[in-house]
Image (cartoon, rainbow, N blue to C red):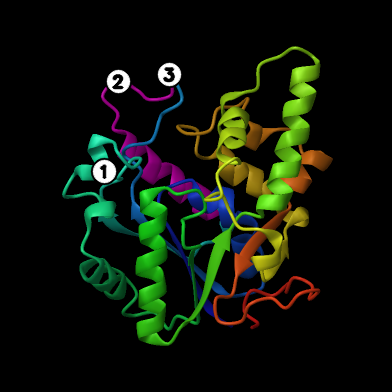
Amino acid sequence: MATVVFFHAHPDDEALATAGTMIKMSAAGHRVLLVLATRGEEGEPVPGVLSDGEELGERRSQEVQAAADLLGVARVAFLDYRDSGMIGSSSSENPACFWQADESEAVGRLDALLADEAVDLLVAYDPHGGYGHPDHIQVHRVGTRWAAEHGVRLRWVTMNRDIVRSVVAEAMGEVSEVGQEPDADLAKRSERLTDDLFGLPDAEITHGIVVTEVLERKRAAIAAHASQVAPDSFFLAPLDARYEAAFGTEWFVDPGRPRIAGEPHRTDLLLN
């Protein structure tokens, strides 16, 4: 059995991007670890969800533990940098934020967290962090460097740009036909899709892990992040064919062995 580290930037990233894979690997007997660079202090809370005086970072730390329990995660750990927010914001200039962290120091923190673990595989983000968020880009840099220094197999989690564009375009078209406004998640995702920093094209993706059989648990893990995901969010839509198309496969890249043209996606994250 393997020890697999999923390295994410903020609480909820694990549920949205890799929940199904984590569930399946844990169920197969692998030791699944979740490392988070920050506690997500700069997130945008769902209106009314926080109690008076409740700190968002603390709330999100509790939410990610609840999600991790649903995913079969053996251990949750934090590098404990501050959330950077988006590029250009004042939070991204904070010396304590992850974006401003010295890369060698951050690799050292990750090394200290994993010192007692015999890691077989580390999962980080693709080179532009999935959609250009500075903390995601920093996870890519730190995770990729750590894996190289330790001779550990590496996978980059990404989004299949071609499939997501198709699903979101269809959803936006249906909303437009009935004269409604898209929900905030759908509108934001549609806007991001115009940027080539969103995900990767299918041809560059090496692994497609089908998680349709655990979609209900994945959806429950997403719902555990109630401070970030409203009940009417696109991420908590009914478990229908569109939801399956959007979230039923999780996508990864093996940077050491690109996919050959015409080759099917590999279906076991541990195999090269």
SS class, disc 3: loop
Location of the C terminus (image quadrant): bottom right
Q: Earlier in the sequence, mark 2 or mark 1?
A: 2
Q: Residue at x 55, y 44 (%)?
A: 195
Residue that badge 1 annotates: 92
- Verify CB contact (< 8 Å) between mark 3 and mark 2: no
Q: Nearer the viewer, residue 204 or 27?
A: 204
Asked whether the residues under the numbered discs 1 and 3 touch, taking CB atoms below 8 Å apart as contact, a structural biologist would say no
Label 2 amino acid?
Answer: Asp
Spatial CA span between label 1 and label 3: 26 Å
Mark 2 → mark 1, Cα distance in angstroms:
26 Å
Q: x, y percentage for residue 61?
A: 37, 45
Q: Secondary structure at mark 1?
A: helix
Find residue 65 and report its horizontal and vertical position in percent.
44, 50
Residues rendered magenta in the picture: 49-69
Q: Position of residue 262 (x, y in %)?
A: 81, 74
> In front here: 54 or 79?
79
Residue 236 placement: quadrant: top right
- Classify the position of the N terminus by image quarter: bottom right
Kindly identify which residue carries mark 2.
Answer: 52
The answer to whether residue 251 is above or below residue 53 is below
